[in-house]
Amino acid sequence: MTEPSASAPPRPFRIFSRTDVGKRRQRNEDSLGVMARHGVFVVADGMGGVDGGDFCSRLVVDCMSEAFQSVSPDELSYRETIDLVETTIEESSAKIKQEAIVRGISGMGTTVVVICLNLKTMKEGCALHVGDSRVYRQRGRNIESLTIDHSMAAESGIRDGEMVPMFMAGVITRAVGVRMDVEVDRTPFDVKPGDRFLLCSDGLYNMVPDEKMNQLMSNGSQDPAADLVNAANDAGGFDNITVVLVDLPSPERGDAPGNLDDTVL
């Protein structure tokens, strides 16, 4: 993680992030990115065989990072920030598809989930996603997913914890890079002091029930991201596990704001 510069002002949130290969996979095909100065956070879960998945997830995160490094936060309005995220996802899809054609690989691609927070008001945000990586919001003692998976199971009305037919398990219906163009879902949400936002790949929520995630995010740990990853591994770690947790301090809890520069891991 990059050390904060002397001139970096305190951010109105604390950030915890971690990515892990899990216990069953040979390589980590997940990637994450934090563009804290813009209020932008991203998780991507790649697919596509040998070297394909990690290339795809890394490409979409790198493209996002480069897009926001080229402008200062003051240059973009909140709406322009959201538009830039969507445009970058669309451009990444075309780049991945072109690379897949060169490599002769079918099905190379990645999920992506992004949240944009309005840093001027800290009262609203927007989730943009493709695939089955998720954003959760924890408010008080309640946790809820703000995104709906682009998966056969979700589109068939099957909820987490219910029996998923074998032919549906892990099958997503939309991904970045499978086609030149891609449809990105936008989900606006409100923001309140004390909210926590969790971005994660399916390697977390397939292993750790929502109730357990809620508990781990509420126990006052110094590193809740590590706690979530460890819980997924303890449950079997069948897939790569990636989490980005954005914690908005609450005066009622006596929280202090963080002071973090951007980082991409």
Image (tube, rainbow, N blue to C red):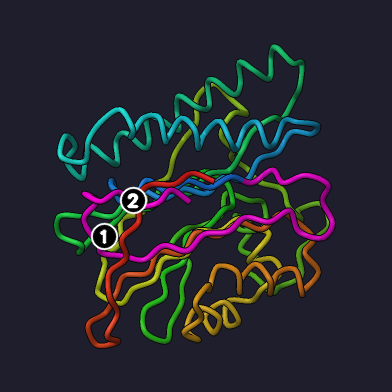
Q: Where is residue 92 in the image (x, y as percent from the top left)?
A: 50, 27
Q: In this view, does 25 lie above or below 214?
A: above
Numbered mark located on residue 36 in the image: 2
Q: Which numbered disc covers residue 219?
A: none
Q: Write down the residue under mark 1.
A: 11
Left or right of residue 69: residue 64:
right
Q: Residues within 10 Å of mark 1 (few under 14, many from 20)?
A: some
Give the x, y percent position of residue 191: 26, 67
Q: Which residue is drawn at 57% across and 77% down?
A: 213
Sequence-earlier tag: 1 or 2: 1
Magenta residues, start to end:
1-30
**Disc 1 + disc 2, Cβ < 8 Å:** yes
* SS of the residue under disc 2: helix
Q: x, y percentage for residue 63?
A: 46, 30
Q: What residue type is labelled 2?
A: Ala
Q: Is the magenta stretch mostly helix, strand or loop?
A: loop
Q: Is residue 12 magenta?
A: yes
The amino acid sitting under disc 1 is Arg
The residue nearer to you, when weighing 49 against 260, is 260
Q: How many labels, in total?
A: 2
